[in-house]
Amino acid sequence: MSELAVRPIHSKADINAFVELAYRLNGDDPHWVAPLRDEVKATIDPKKNGWFSHAEAQLFLAERNGKVVGRISAHIDRLALEMPPEQGFGPGTGFWGLFEAEDAEVAAAVIAAAEAWLRDKGMTRALGPVSLSIWEEPGLLVKGHDHSPTVLMGHHPARYQGWIEALGYTEAKKLITYDLDIAQGFPPLIQRIVAAGEKNARIKIRKVNKKRFDEEAAIILAILNDAWSDNWGFVPLTQPEIDDVGKKLKPLVFEDLIMIAELDGEPVAFMVTLPDLNEPLKPLKGKLLPFGWAKLLLWLRRPKAYTMRVPLMGVVKRLQSSRMASQLAFMMIEYIRRAAVPNYGAKRGEIGWILDDNQGMIAIADAIESRINREYLIYQKPL
């Protein structure tokens, strides 16, 4: 008779086992992109992830007859607890994530362990999967299993959905990504809007200056925290997080792929675009040795990527729902498209994730003739 046990991790060996499980369970999925092991370890290391400056987490392993068969994190974000409940989080809200399970029994056991930890901490509601921050990899993939994710997006077995929902979890929020053809120009209406903006002396769309990386990052952070402040699930990004994310993503920062829009000389909007790092990562299968590091370094020096991802964009709150906001967005998208196609060989773009009730962004996505290609669900359950 099999014996299943779930326990908190304690040692370096436990951390290695926690990381390695994902490779064993997902390695046969042709669309799963194995992350670099050191990057995964950095995510769960309080010394290397600035998110821990306002959060705490406990990692769990499930073992059956001595074999690791499941994992999960349970975590509390103190900034999320301070958010208004009508925005999705608020007092009593805890999270679980980094979820992997060999079967439904294991899924139930690890989620129960995360729930118990959250209850012991005084939480009254669980949201998941959120791994670890809402800004990292939120949600469970429920549509789009037939193609690989882009950089910084999750990919999960389809069977997980049924296992989670069988435990009483219901949808809290849907996140969507949009796919679009960028090899061709945008529709005539969008071209006219962009052309009109180019004639407007009040508007300036500029590339970021990588030599002033910290200053440019501060401008983007200020716009982001203002633009997203009323969104469902918003938790302000903090400087320690920005510092750590900056170190990780700086090699992916290319000046002609990140735009800041100025109105009357004031920065009011931005758009961040990243070449899809998952394309060179996928054949490495999570390993840089013996030759993976050289291949990746060569790609980073002169990246060629079929896909570009827009993970973040924002317009200051005072301009939202205005024609100016849409015009700035279309101009930034078009300027980045003009660079991405000839300079990086890009053919497609992916925008997201986007909240499924973000009508402004959905309208922009529809106007440039993009289509939904992936959907993620964040689940909730009272404790």
Image (tube, rainbow, N blue to C red):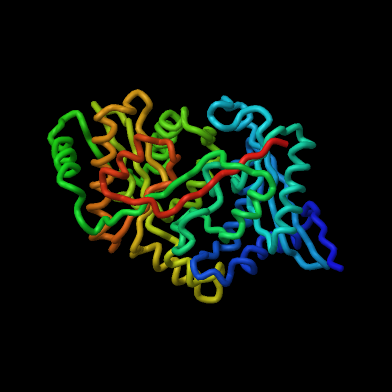
Q: Nearer the viewer, residue 163 or 84?
A: 163
Q: Quadrant of residue 295?
A: bottom left
Residue 264 vs residue 220: left or right?
Answer: left
- The residue shown at (44%, 53%) is 374
- The residue shown at (40%, 59%) is 276
Q: Nearer the viewer, residue 89 or 59?
A: 89
Residue 318 vs residue 292: left or right?
Answer: left
Q: Evaluate whether residue 50 shows in this view.
A: no
Whether residue 16 is situated above or below residue 43 in the rendered picture? below
> Can you name the residue that lies furthest to the bottom here?
290
Residue 213 vs residue 122: left or right?
Answer: left
- The residue shown at (26%, 52%) is 337
- The residue shown at (27%, 35%) is 326
Residue 213 vs residue 180: left or right?
Answer: right
Number of numbered discs on residues: 0
Q: Evaluate whether residue 268 shows in this view.
A: yes
Which quadrant of the figure contains the C terminus? top right
Which quadrant of the figure contains the N terminus? bottom right
Q: Position of residue 154 (x, y in %)?
A: 52, 55
Q: Position of residue 12 (x, y in %)?
A: 74, 59
> Can you name the residue that lies furthest to the right here?
1
Q: Nearer the viewer, residue 285 or 322?
A: 322
Q: Position of residue 282 (x, y in %)?
A: 48, 68
Q: Position of residue 240 (x, y in %)?
A: 56, 39
Whether residue 97 is situated above or below residue 227 in the rendered picture? below
